[in-house]
Amino acid sequence: MEIEEEEEIEEEEEIEEEEEIEEKEQNNILEQIEELRKRSEDRDAEIESLKKELVELKAQKEVSEIKGTGERAEKEKESEKEEKVVNFKPYGFVELVGYANDAHFMSNDLLIYVKNEDRSTANMSVRNSRFGFDITLPYIKAVDFSAKFEIDFLGVLPESGNAEANVGMRLRHAYFKAAKTFKSDTSLALTAGQTWSTAMIPIFPNMVNPSYGWGSGNLWNRLPLAELEIAQKAGSVNMGLKLAAVKPITGASANRRSFLEANIDAGDASHWPSLQSQLYLKTKFSGIDLFWAAGGAYGREDYTAGVKTNNSDSRVFGNEVEVWVFNTALKVVHKYAELQGKYFIGENLDMFGFFGGSLIKENGLVMESMQAMGYWAEISLKPLNGLRLVVGMGGEYTDPKDSDPADYAYDRNDSFWISAFYTFFDHFTPGFQWQRITTEKNDTKLTGNSYLGSLKFTF
């Protein structure tokens, strides 16, 4: 009996243990199910959060794109407005020049030739000061348009007496240029306005003297013209040809006191423009810049109707006379030195300078041609940054034949000069020059010395 009871008790305990184990297993399963449910809910919440963030990001992107498009459009409009602005770049200098001469020169501050070696002069001037600006139109892409306008104060007002505070403003340059460069490196350009005469190669001696070589072998002038230029670039070589129709002027033009004076101009009366050309070559090699050019001009002056000269009451008469010139120039530039010079020959060259060594001569009351030639050469040393030391010489020689000495300026005019310039702070340049001029005419020889100093501020 006791044994049976014990067995029943053991069975019951086993059943209870099994029930407890089963219950624990069920609880574990329920806990796992609950944990999975919670994880699922958290995942769903996370998914919903990510969906919301995605929607917000898309909205922000759309707003940003709209805003960016608007900003780009505004920037493009502003850019277009900026590109359509005409660019002006001012430049120039203020210069005080002083001189002391031991002789009387034709135009004392220009030192053309010696008139009287028994007189001396001294003075100072700021009339060579200059102002100008370059103009560009960058918004035009098909063609490069540019222009230049430049003045100084070396002009003469009628009856002003050349007073320093009452000078004439002189138009130096006023022109525009249209240029086009093609893929072949060929370029075409049209220049219209007033600038350097096409036949005259624009290189100049390093002088304080503002005539820049008039009377000393350097012909130059600025005239109204229409010029066509074609150029070709091949590696480091650039060569070109210029052709131009240029305003003809004469001694009669140069000798008028006023543009209102009733006078016939022999250049106008000829019905001929001055036909001019220039061939040039530029290249670089071994640290050297080389420039060579040759230019020429041909025109006529017509005196058949009679022309007043030097404001005289009588007229001079004659047939048409020729005006022609050939000149060539070379300039070689190195970091420490420069070599440059020019040679010319021609007839009736007052068109290209104060006299150019060659006025039209008067034989009785008939105008005839006069031939002249000239040269100048100069070497500059640049031993220090900003320092330039210069030595140069030049001359002009006429062929008066049997002309009356009153009809021409000189048989020969020789010049020698030494100059020194030093530039500091990139804008300030003091300069000094000694120039000796010897003028010969009709077996008379006159010599004069000039000592010039300058202070220049460039901007």
Image: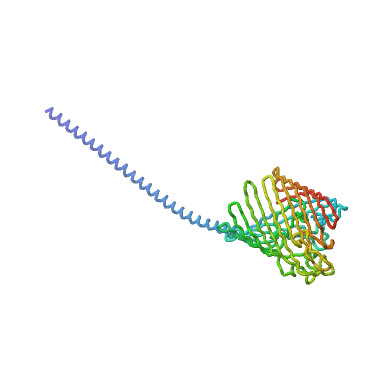
Q: Residue at x 46, y 55 (%)?
A: 62
Q: Name the quadrant containing residue 171.
A: bottom right
Left or right: residue 135 versus residue 70 is right
Tell me where residue 18 appears, x and y as whole percent: 21, 35
Question: Which colour assignment does the render follow?
Answer: rainbow
Tell me where residue 50 appears, x and y as whole percent: 40, 48
Of the 4 image quadrants, the one containing the N terminus is top left
The answer to whether residue 84 is seen in the rendering is no
The one nearer the camera, 419 or 215, is 215
**Is 90 located above or below residue 300 in the figure?**
above
Q: Residue at x 62, y 46 (%)?
A: 286
Tell me where residue 363 appears, x and y as whole percent: 82, 66
Tell me where residue 44 appears, x and y as whole percent: 35, 48
The one nearer the camera, 423 or 278, is 278
Q: How many marks?
A: 0
In the rendered image, the residue lying farthest to the front is 401
**Is 12 located above or below residue 400 in the figure?**
above
**Is 364 located above or below residue 418 in the figure?**
below
In the rendered image, the residue lying farthest to the left is 1
